[in-house]
Amino acid sequence: MSPVTGHHDVLVLGGGVAGCVLAARLSEDPARGVCLVEAGPDHGVDRARWPRTLLDAHALPRDHMWERGVAVHRLRARVLGGSSCVNGCWHTWGSDADHEEWTRAGGPRWSAAAMAPYRKRAAAAMRLRPVPEREFSVWARAALAGARELGYEEVDMGVPGAPGCGTPLLNALDGLRWNAAFGYLGPARSRANLTVLGEATANRLLLDGGEVVGAEVVVDGRTETLTADTYVLACGTFGSAGLLLRSGIGPADELREAGVRAEVDLPGVGANLSDQPGVFVPLAPTPDLNAALAAQEKEGELYVSRMLIRAASTHCPAGGWDLHILPSAGDPLFGSLPPGQYEAGVAAFLMKPASRGRVRLRSADPAEPLDIDPGFLTDPGGRDMAVLREGLEIAQRLAATSALAPLAGAVPSGELTDAGLRSRLGTYWHPVGTCAMGPATDPLAVTDGAGRVHGVSNLRVADASVLPSVPAANTQFPVLAAAELLADALKEAAR
Ligand SMILES: Cc1cc2nc3c(=O)[nH]c(=O)nc-3n(C[C@H](O)[C@H](O)[C@H](O)COP(=O)(O)OP(=O)(O)OC[C@H]3O[C@@H](n4cnc5c(N)ncnc54)[C@H](O)[C@@H]3O)c2cc1C
């Protein structure tokens, strides 16, 4: 039997950030046969063979995406290593309030103290380190001074803590994006009990009486059925929900409408999508700022942003924060301006949205793009809009500080209506929640605190989609730690 069609102990579907963690940790036991299935290419162990765009941490690439020419909130990578191959390499941690939300949903293993060892493991594997001095632009340095002028104290962004200003941890090493395939699969690839399949797309799971009996996977243009004792989904917030829905696990009425036979009625699948929208306040860089940025670019050390503020709106519970204020200067995130000219500004991101979106199937056809509604600013009370507006005010106050104002002028703009603000919404690209964990008594819970899917005995989900609420943080670090935790939970169950 080939290593593909042979029976595996664990089949991990989706080789992104979480999938790489799971494959690496679960294959540490040589007695456990693990197969990792990734829809995108596997560029291998040799870094020299990786596309330059994915390695270059100076910019966000648009290649290796699931879809082209789509709204920015749909962007997600399709490559071994997942979105860690295309993202901003920023790592921050959320607040104690995030852990309280997760602990309520998933039990004590999700507390800040219980997750601390997983946070440390993830930091080590991804080689997280503070921003080196040489990577601070004139703008980032002035922004830190401006934040202090506004009364924000410096805080460690890599641990739960208080509002304040500071710098992220980075997995960008001398300009190289150190992705999860390098960090986690690198040391694991030579194990005889680990099979890594690139360019292999999971279409659906096959179920029999509340148990998964196979995964239909397209490999080299052929549809194969792969089997295992345990199936773990790590296709990301959009992909894992889509795969469950195509397999007949989801809201029964919605599945029937899409032409899929309902196997397990789980109304929460695809619901509860939670992401962080943001708005950018553009400024006009002075010739001096442009010149300073150009000089830094010549040195190969120009990065668009290297500092942030964790800010609390008047709606935020005491001690936490619900906004990231993020000054940036350099080339736009996608694309570039003529030599010597740059974009500067300050963005405000809503970190703890009350609004929820949804992922749905358009049809049973796996080739059909998913219907993804981010639900930005749709909460009935309008709290999200109010918080984001407070974020914009803080962004404007930061731009007007004596540290930043000499470097970039205000761009005249009229009063920003709600409709105008909606039309300018971007995203921080941190979607979670479509397979949310929670007790079986919660009708919208999809998984339990160990990642087990309610109502299916040998199926787990172990990626960003299980987080019931988005943390007040960039999500890669929390997802890495969550995947470490869920790998341990699976190991415990096997003992
Ligand atoms: C443009 C962008 C910028 C970002 N910047 C940052 C940042 O600076 N800091 C930060 O903390 N976070 C950032 N993020 C978010 C971070 O990358 C995600 O939180 C993280 O990747 C989530 O991990 P995951 O394993 O859940 O999903 P992913 O990493 O997206 O992995 C899912 C994997 O599953 C595969 N897959 C999907 N469906 C199938 C299928 N049917 N069959 C087989 N394989 C499948 C995909 O190809 C992909 O490789 C960014 C995200 C994006 C898109």
Image: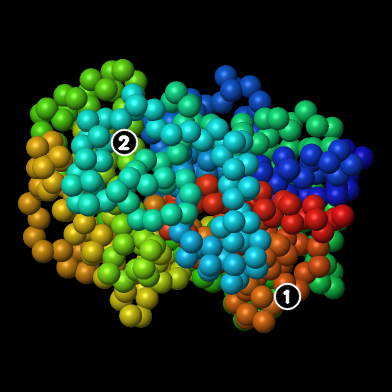
Going by the picture, which residue comes out furthest to the right? 1
Q: Which residue is mark 2?
A: 304
Vertical comparison of 123 with 115: above or below: above
Three-letter residue code for mark 1: Val
Q: Where in the figure is residue 164, as x and y percent of width and height?
A: 32, 51
Determine whether the residue tagged by mark 2 lies in a helix, strand or loop: loop
Asked if one can make out residue 335 in the rendered structure from this viewpoint, the answer is no
Label 1, label 2: how far apart the Cα atoms are: 46 Å
Expressed as whole percent of the image width and height from the top left, the position of residue 456 reads: 77, 69
Q: Is residue 288 left or right of residue 179?
A: left
Q: Badge 2: few (under 14), some or many (20 or more) residues near its Cα, within 10 Å?
A: many
Q: Quadrant of the N terminus?
A: top right
Coordinates of residue 141 in the picture (x, y in percent): 25, 34
Q: Quadrant of the C terminus?
A: bottom right
> What amino acid does circle 2 point to?
Val
Residue 235 left/right relative to 311: right
Q: Is residue 307 visible?
A: yes
For label 1, the residue is: 264
Asked if disc 1 is less than 8 Å from ligand 1, the answer is no
Residue 387 picture quarter? bottom left
Label 1 neighbour load within 10 Å: few <14, some 14-19, many 20+: many
Q: Secondary structure at mark 1?
A: strand
Q: Position of residue 195 (x, y in %)?
A: 78, 38
